[in-house]
Image (cartoon, rainbow, N blue to C red):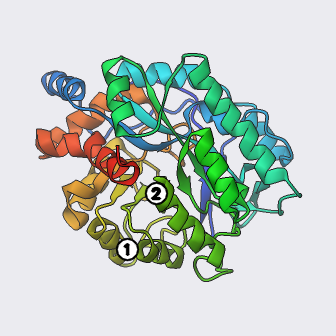
Amino acid sequence: MGLTRRKFVIGGAVALGAIGLGAYFKLRPVPVALGFEPDPEMLIKAKALIAKYPSFDLHAHPGIGFAREATGLSPMMKMFSLKAGFEEKTVADMQAGGMNAVTFCAVADFQLLDLVKGKGLVSTREFELGEAWASYRTQMDNLLNLDKSGLVQLVFNTRDILQARIDGKTAALLGIEGGDFLGGSIEHLHEAYADGLRVINPMHYHHNELGDIMTAEPEHHGLTPAGKAIIKEMNSLGMVIDGAHSSLDSLAQILDISDKPIFCSHTHILSEGQVMPRFISRELALGIAEADGVIGAWPAGLGISTMDGMITRILELVDIVGVDHVGLGTDMDANFKPVWDDYTDFPLVVMRMLQRGLNEDEVAKIIGGNGLRVLTAVTGQ
């Protein structure tokens, strides 16, 4: 398990507050540090709990699929893209670990990104005419092919996820980081919905036609008029809004505008004296909870270095927003220095939550129940 496994891990970059994919392009066989000793009897209980309740990862990039066939990349991102294409391995890990459903995420602004000395991962250019939509089309077709090949079961709502679980299929809900491909267009949003896209982070690492990101100086000071219109239309269509990566002003405006609960799929809450530009304020976290949304516990190596540190983060979220508003957002296969980097270790995560005082019902909510509740509220199914 996690004590002895050695695997290839893709890391990230931190500099002047910019955090993201791909700082470590070399192969680095570093095992995840657990920070605790597994208990065989508790592990059996954890596996039984996973078998009993549905699980749902709010945000992941299985097999780094978003980098398949990517064009217009910087030399460094091209190196990163060479690692893409191991979806079969990751899906096998999901099945082995008992993870039922995952939001498979494309990355709208991938070809704009580069590692810049002194800044970390940032967007370094603008899109060429038609480039953003063409990239979306390539990534979406690749995601849809995972369903056509039978590797996963494409799902659109909670009902579909529960049926896929009964059928023994890995459920893939389709999402994308960044609304750049929309170009502010409601028509493009409708086309994406028809494609099967159900989750959108309006912003990622590039200020776009919808609003500001959280890891750069503001350009729009929140959402643009087009961004506000997109949020309202996503509500009407039954698409999940994911506030992760949105600037704090943008996130506040999303909460004001949306009449449906949201995901904030992979983040944590800022504390006094802590500078973590990918974390959100306590006030916004409480706002997400008040709107009946869910915040995904994120196993990134930001201020933590062990899996047990992630469990501490889960408990902190529970203390602040309540157990009904905490989920899992692994960012799997494209995370920053992950302290959980393999779905086969899912039973260890569940075991440690139980060991640290959460009861069965509480763990069931965190591993899937809360995210599925939000998905039901948004899609109506």
Residue 30 spot, x, y in % from top left: 52, 33
Quarter of the image where the N terminus is located: top left
Q: Is residue 127 left or right of residue 87?
A: right
Question: Could you tell me which secondary element the residue under label 2 belongs to?
Answer: loop
Q: Which residue is mark 1?
A: 284
- Residue 19 image position (x, y, % from top left): 59, 59
Quadrant including the C terminus: top left
Rendered location of residue 127, percent (x, y): 83, 59
Identify the residue at horizontal 37%, vertical 44% (top origin): 306
Image vertical order of residue 48 relative to residue 320, above or below = above
Label 1 amino acid? Leu
Q: Quadrant of residue 210?
A: bottom right
Q: Is residue 203 at all visible to an observer of this figure?
A: yes
Query: For the residue carrying disc 1, how many other residues have a C-alpha within 10 Å: few (<14), some (14-19), or many (20+)?
Result: some
Query: In the image, what residue occupies the spot 40% across and 20% down?
Result: 95
- Residue type pointed to by label 2: Leu
According to the picture, the residue beneath numbered tag 2 turns out to be 302
Kindly report the distance in space between the C-alpha atoms of the residues bearing marks 1 and 2.
20 Å
